[in-house]
Amino acid sequence: MTGRKKILDSVKEFYSENNGVKKFEPSKTYIPVSGKILDENDLVNLVDSSLDMWLTAGRYSDEFEREFSRFLEVKHCSLVNSGSSANLVAFTALTSHKLGERRLKDGDEVITVAAGFPTTISPIIQNGMVPVFIDVDLETYDYKVEDIEKAISEKTKAIFMAHTLGNPFNLDKIMELAKKYNLWVIEDSCDALGSKYNGKYTGTIGHIGTFSFYPAHHITMGEGGAVVTNDPLLHKLITSIRDWGRDCICPPGKDNVCNNRFTQKHGDLPLGYDHKYVYSHLGYNLKVTDMQAAIGVSQLKKLNGFIEKRNENFEKLYKGLSHLDEFIILPKATKNSEPSWFGFPITLKENDKYNRNDLVEFLELSKIGTRLLFAGNILKQPVFTENNYEYKVIGNLENTDIIMENTFWIGVWPGITDECITYIIYKFNEFFSYNK
């Protein structure tokens, strides 16, 4: 038996001795809105990668990029260190001079929604462009289809928004407008891994898709994310932005993959300047470590089961709460979609008896985890009220404000058992005085 095998066998033994299943106790065991499901294979992969002492992206990173591309049926995948970095890399890639007239420039307008997570919006402003905010519908939390074309001007160059809590946005309309007005489309699928629209995975329908592998998400690497595309030029730009802005395609620790390391002319550099040190963009170092990727490789093998369990939990909650529709707005999948639900959003209907805070506080005291729908209305957040960022608004964002005041979500992740769901439904009934 090799030394490595001995170590890994010991890791399996250690895991089995220290990771028993804890019994759920109603009103005592906290039910978090999200969480990670890890097993001995995840730990074995993590230790196996650490034994290589290869501390940047390596063999596991390569394997994950191949397998993730295969799962999504997309040509190219670039691993990054977070979903937020994925959004930054994806958007910044579209500013490249190598895109010619289609490159995004300072002052260009980008359509998005105000009811979302800040890091979908941050790259727009960080790259000197103007976010144009449109409202969303309740139930689906999808953008208002009737407003999106009103948001398009001569300055509009891209659409960048997220599939909220795993519910795909209307990609038919967006891709129709993208074609009509020659716009880039970035799908933020950080909360929507495994969701489908018209039978295709979200993140693969627009020009670029982004994903997150934070512990709360469908699979985890701890920290981690990915950028995917079917366009070879965009893929090259994405990897350049991720890897210091380099022009070179050599992976870490490898030289002269193109066999032209010392034969090319770039910019005003001398002929033959070492291609590993030619920079086409102002980039970053946003790679993952191979230890992160090793966990991802193991997690990816369990993804289909995770998705199935999330959707089962969603359906059980929906069925169990549907009789409360006089008090709450229940979530609804967008047309033509098959969501891979990240959470179960609920909007409290207007009434004179109680507000969202009353319900959320009751649930939290009952050991049921809750979260608001991220920023609510991002324009009401200090990041906008205390700064002078340029932006535009289409309409009055009425539903966005309702979400800010009345919406929250509870979990559907695979760690939530049937016993948890029964208890959650019981506590909702108790709050609304429906228990007999």
Image: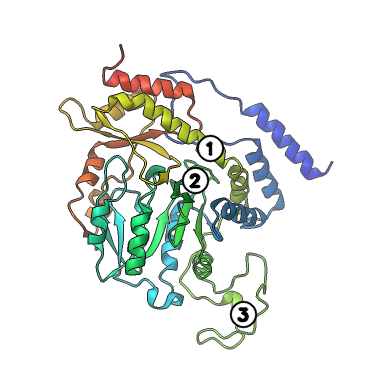
Instruction: Find numbered disc 3 in the image and state the secondary structure of the residue it sits on.
Output: loop
Residues at circles 1 and 2 in contact by the CB criterion of under 8 Å: yes
Q: Residue at x 45, y 23 (%)?
A: 420
Q: Residue at x 71, y 49 (%)?
A: 51
Instruction: Find numbered disc 1 in the image and state the secondary structure of the residue it sits on.
Output: helix
The earlier-in-sequence mark between 1 and 2 is 2
Report the Cα–Cα distance between label 1 and label 3.
46 Å
Q: Residue furthest top?
A: 436
Q: Residue furthest right?
A: 1
Q: Please name whichever residue, 355 or 208, is drawn nearer the observer in this view of the structure.
A: 208
The C terminus appears in which quarter of the rendering?
top left
On the image, the x and y values in percent for residue 11 come to 70, 36
Q: Which residue is mark 1?
A: 306
- Circle 3 crowding by C-alpha within 10 Å: few under 14, some 14–19, many from 20: some
Q: Residue at x 36, y 33 (%)?
A: 370
Judge depth for marks 1 and 3 and give the one in front. Answer: 1
